[in-house]
Amino acid sequence: MIERIDTVCIKVMNVEESSKWYQNIMGFKETYKGEGYRILSIGNSAVPFTIEEGDVMSTNNGTYPIFFQKI
């Protein structure tokens, strides 16, 4: 059974610039810096926000949740 949303991911054109924007304008905090992606925290929420560098013009939806399931 799924216990919670683990993160919400969106695709961005430039992960570095997008991370700066979310931090400076939205007040998010960068908590992890990976190759082509960043994980940000939103206030006191337990659900992180993940931005991934990729094709934002694709016809596929670039936003998706990742669920946590205890095995």
Image: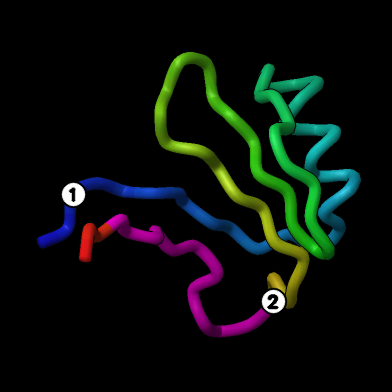
Q: What residue is rendered at 81% in x and 21% in y?
A: 24
Q: If you read the primary sequence from the N terminus, does the residue marked by circle 2 or circle 1 appear first? A: 1
Quarter of the rendering occupied by the N terminus: bottom left
Mark 2 vs mark 1, foreground winner is 1
On the rendered structure, is 36 left or right of 70? right
Quarter of the rendering occupied by the C terminus: bottom left
State the image coordinates of residue 21 (x, y, percent, origin top left).
80, 33
Membership of 69 in magenta stretch: no
Q: Residues within 10 Å of mark 1 (few under 14, many from 20)?
A: few
Q: Residue furthest front?
A: 71
Task: Give how far apart the Cα atoms at labels 2 and 1 are.
Answer: 32 Å
Element on which disc 1 rests: strand
On the rendered structure, is 2 left or right of 7? left
Read off the magenta span. Answer: 57-68
Q: What is the number of the mark on residue 3? A: 1
State the image coordinates of residue 7 (x, y, percent, origin top left).
45, 49
The correct choice, above or below, for 10 with respect to 4 in the image is below
Q: Which quadrant holds residue 56? A: bottom right
The correct choice, above or below, for 61 with respect to 12 in the image is below
On the rendered structure, is 64 left or right of 20? left
